[in-house]
Image (cartoon, rainbow, N blue to C red):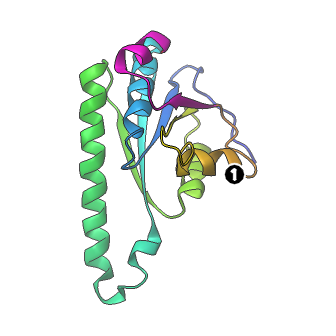
């Protein structure tokens, strides 16, 4: 069952969800979401998903590796929180999950009825829009919310003009 969005009801705010990874274009999605949230009174939610496959071959040191990945996720999120704060008057919330990225995105959207828009940025390389955009756009069943795909070659100024 699809949870109805409540972002415009009293006591709720519209959230812009950005999936954080190490791709160069990820910054473009954060900038766009931060500027849109600032202009519309919304909130930016930054999601980092740790793949469980990173631990499968190291059962003896699984807990150490998991802790290291969690620390790496928090550090990466912290950098993007700082970036969002530097370009807009927003205070992003952060979420770390472990699992299949598409499933974790869908689960978070289902759990948080204030998430109204998923913001992604397209890669600029010749190999296509990037693995996240490709997986999201081909996911069966979709995410039941709009997906905004920001061109990865836009400057901060160009994004500000569009947001």
From the top left corner, tell me how far across and down residue 114 is, in percent. Answer: 55, 32
Q: Which quarter of the picture shows residue 137?
A: top right
Say above or below: 156 vs 95.
above
Q: Residue furthest front?
A: 126
Say above or below: 63 vs 120.
below
Disc 1 target residue: 139
Left or right of 54, for residue 130: right
Q: Residue at x 39, y 77 (%)?
A: 55
Q: How many other residues sit within 10 Å of disc 1, few (<14), some (14-19) or many (≥20)?
A: few
Helix, strand, or loop for circle 1? loop
From the top left corner, tell me how far across and down residue 5 is, in percent. Answer: 64, 31
- Residue 50 or residue 115, whichever sits in front: 50
From the top left corner, tell me how far across and down residue 68 is, in percent. Answer: 25, 67
Q: Which residues are magenta?
A: 147-162
Q: Residue at x 43, y 23 (%)?
A: 154
Say above or below: 156 vs 15.
above
Q: Residue at x 27, y 68 (%)?
A: 67
Left or right of 158, for residue 78: left
Exactly how many numbered labels are in the figure? 1
- Residue 150 or residue 36, whichever sits in front: 150
- Residue 44 or residue 6, whichever sits in front: 44
From the top left corner, tell me how far across and down residue 13 is, in percent. Answer: 50, 24
Q: Residue at x 70, y 49 (%)?
A: 138
Question: Is 108 one of the magenta-colored residues?
Answer: no
């Amino acid at each position: 069952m699809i949870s109805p969005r409540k972002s415009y009801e009293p006591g709720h705010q519209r959230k812009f969800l950005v999936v954080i990874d190490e791709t160069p274009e990820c910054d473009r999605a954060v900038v766009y979401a931060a500027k849109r949230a600032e202009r519309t009174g919304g909130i930016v939610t930054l999601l980092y998903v740790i793949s469980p496959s990173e631990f499968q071959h190291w059962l003896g040191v699984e807990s150490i590796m998991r802790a290291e990945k969690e620390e790496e996720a928090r550090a990466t999120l912290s950098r993007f929180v700082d970036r969002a704060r530097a370009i807009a008057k927003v205070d992003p919330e952060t979420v770390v999950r472990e699992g299949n990225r598409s499933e974790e995105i869908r689960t978070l959207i289902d759990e948080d009825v204030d998430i109204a828009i998923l913001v992604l940025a397209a890669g600029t390389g010749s190999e296509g829009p990037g693995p996240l955009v490709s997986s999201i756009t081909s996911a069966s069943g979709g995410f039941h919310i709009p997906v905004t795909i920001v061109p990865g070659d836009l400057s901060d100024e160009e994004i500000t003009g569009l947001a």
